[in-house]
Amino acid sequence: MSEFNGEIRKMMIILSKATLDNVYAAFILANGARAEGIEAEMFFTFFGLEAIQTKKLEHLHVATVGNPAMHIPTLLGGIPGMESLATTMMKKEMDKIDIPPVHEFLDILSASGVRLWACKLAMDMFHLKKEDLYEGVEKVITVGDFYERAKGLGTHILFI
């Protein structure tokens, strides 16, 4: 067996929330890993499943309530239309720097070799079927399956 030098060989990214900022953070990290020659896999669980549900993936939004990075009081974040406004503004800024929409980004991730998995427990809990998901999702797996896939030196698990 070769000596391990601490290099990152695989990124296992868990996405648990499908707010626009969380989804893009996870996608950019997975894409960056592949660009660096690092294996990357994504495990979508709980509300993170919305990022791969065909009916929801193009309708993700920015959370304005309880998000300290918004720098607006919680009361203002809850005003009707505020979340929609923040989402529209963020999407415009992303367009300016050529960040692709969610479905297109999923296509890019799949084409680059990022493996996409859906969480069985969350799928069962939300009464979802594989047919409800983006076509690039390989399989619905258990947490145990996920940990089995994460075995090996140089694997890092990131929870978003």
Image: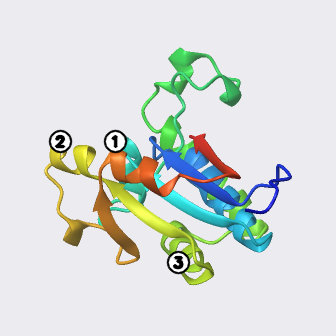
Asked whether the viewer can see residue 119, the reply is yes
Image coordinates of residue 55 in percent, x first then y, are 29, 65
Residue 105 quadrant: bottom right
63 left or right, relative to 31: left
For the residue pair 56 and 10, the one nearer the viewer reads as 10
Q: Quadrant of the C terminus?
A: top right
Q: CA distance from mark 3 to mark 2?
A: 26 Å
Disc assigned to residue 110: 3
Dot 3 lies on which element?
Answer: helix
Look at the numbered discs 2 and 1 and tell me whether their residues touch, using CB distance below 8 Å: yes
Q: Which three-letter amino acid code belongs to the residue tagged 3? A: Ser
Q: Amino acid at mark 2?
A: Met
Q: Is residue 135 above or below residue 115?
A: below
Query: What residue would you read off at disc 2?
Result: 125
Q: Residue at x 22, y 67 (%)?
A: 130
Quick one: label 3 or label 2, which is nearer the N terminus? 3
Please give the label number shown on residue 46.
1
Q: Which residue is the extreme one toward the right?
A: 5
Nearer to me, 32 or 59:
32
Give the side of residue 82 with respect to residue 69, left or right. Answer: left
